Amino acid sequence: MNFRREEQIRDNAINDAQNSNGWASNRPSDYEGRMIYDRAFEDAQEANRSDEEIDAEVAEEMEMHDANAKGVMFIAMAIGLLFFSILAQGALVGYSVNYTPFVIIGFILTGVFMYMANGSNAFLNGLFYVGCFAIATRFFAVIVEYYEGVPYVNYIMADTTHLGDLIKYTFFYFVYICLVPYGLMKLVTMMVREFKTPKQQEKKLNI
C-alpha cells in the first residue's frame, strides 16, 4: 500500500471519529486498509475523550472559581451593607438630634398643610410622611437614651460601644422606621378626614 493511500485512510478515520459517523462510513474493504483505519480511528477517539475530559475539568474548575468569587463578593457586599446601614442609622438619628428644632418645625408645618387639605391630598400626605419620618427618627434617639442612660450621640461615639450593640440598634431602627412613620401618617390623616368631614357637611347644609 502506498503512503498516500495510508494517509487518506488515516484522515478518513480521524474525520469519522471526530464527527461520530461510525465505523462503516469510510472504512476500507481490504484487510490492510481496515487495520490502518481501525488503529487511527481508536487513536482519534482516545484523543477526543482526553480533550473532552480536559474540557470538563477546566469547566468544573471555572465553575468552582466563579462560585468562590460570587461567595466572596456576596460576603463583601453583606459586610459593606452592614457598615453602611450602621453609618446611615447613626447619621440619620444623629442629625435628627442635632437639628431637633427643625425636625419639630418641619413636622408641625407638614401636619398643618395636610390638615388644611383635609388629609385628602396625596402630595401633602406624602410631605407629612416625611415629617413623620423625621420626628420618628428623633424619637428613636430618645428610646436609645432611655435604655442606655446616656445621650444618643455620646453612646454612638463612645469607644465602649460594641459593634454588636450598633448592629442591634441598627436592626431595630430599620424595623421601627418602616412601621412607625407610615402608621403615624395613616392614623393622623384618617383622624383629620373623620374630624373635618362632618363640619364640611354642616356648612353645606347651612348654605
Image (cartoon, rainbow, N blue to C red):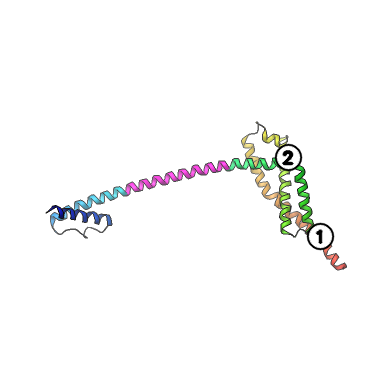
Horizontal and vertical percent position of residue 184:
73, 51
Q: Residue at x 43, y 44 (%)?
A: 65
Q: Is 42 left or right of 133, judged from the image as shown?
A: left
Label placed on residue 98: 2
Q: Nearer the viewer, mark 2 or mark 1?
A: 2
To which residue does mark 1 refer? 196
Q: Residue furthest top?
A: 160
Query: From which residue to which does the magenta span run?
Result: 52-80
Q: Is residue 178 visible?
A: yes
Q: Residue at x 83, y 63 (%)?
A: 200
| Marked residue nearer the N-terminal end (2 or 1) | 2
Crowding around mark 2 (Cα neighbors within 10 Å: few <14, some 14 to 19, many 20+) is few
Q: Is 60 left or right of 83, judged from the image as shown?
A: left
| Amino acid bearing label 2 | Asn
Q: Residue 55 colored magenta? A: yes
Q: Is 56 left or right of 16, judged from the image as shown?
A: right
Q: Is 196 left or right of 62, judged from the image as shown?
A: right
Q: Residue furthest left?
A: 1
Q: Residue at x 71, y 57 (%)?
A: 123
Q: Residue 4 colored magenta? A: no
Horizontal and vertical percent position of residue 32:
13, 54
Horizontal and vertical percent position of residue 78:
55, 43
Q: Nearer the viewer, residue 111 or 41?
A: 111
Question: Which image quadrant for residue 20?
Answer: bottom left
Q: Secondary structure at mark 1?
A: helix
Question: Which image quadrant for residue 9?
Answer: bottom left
Magenta stretch: helix, strand or loop mostly: helix
Horizontal and vertical percent position of residue 30:
13, 58
Q: Nearer the viewer, residue 133 or 198?
A: 133
Labels in figure, total: 2
Q: CA distance from mark 2 to mark 1?
A: 36 Å
| Amino acid bearing label 1 | Lys
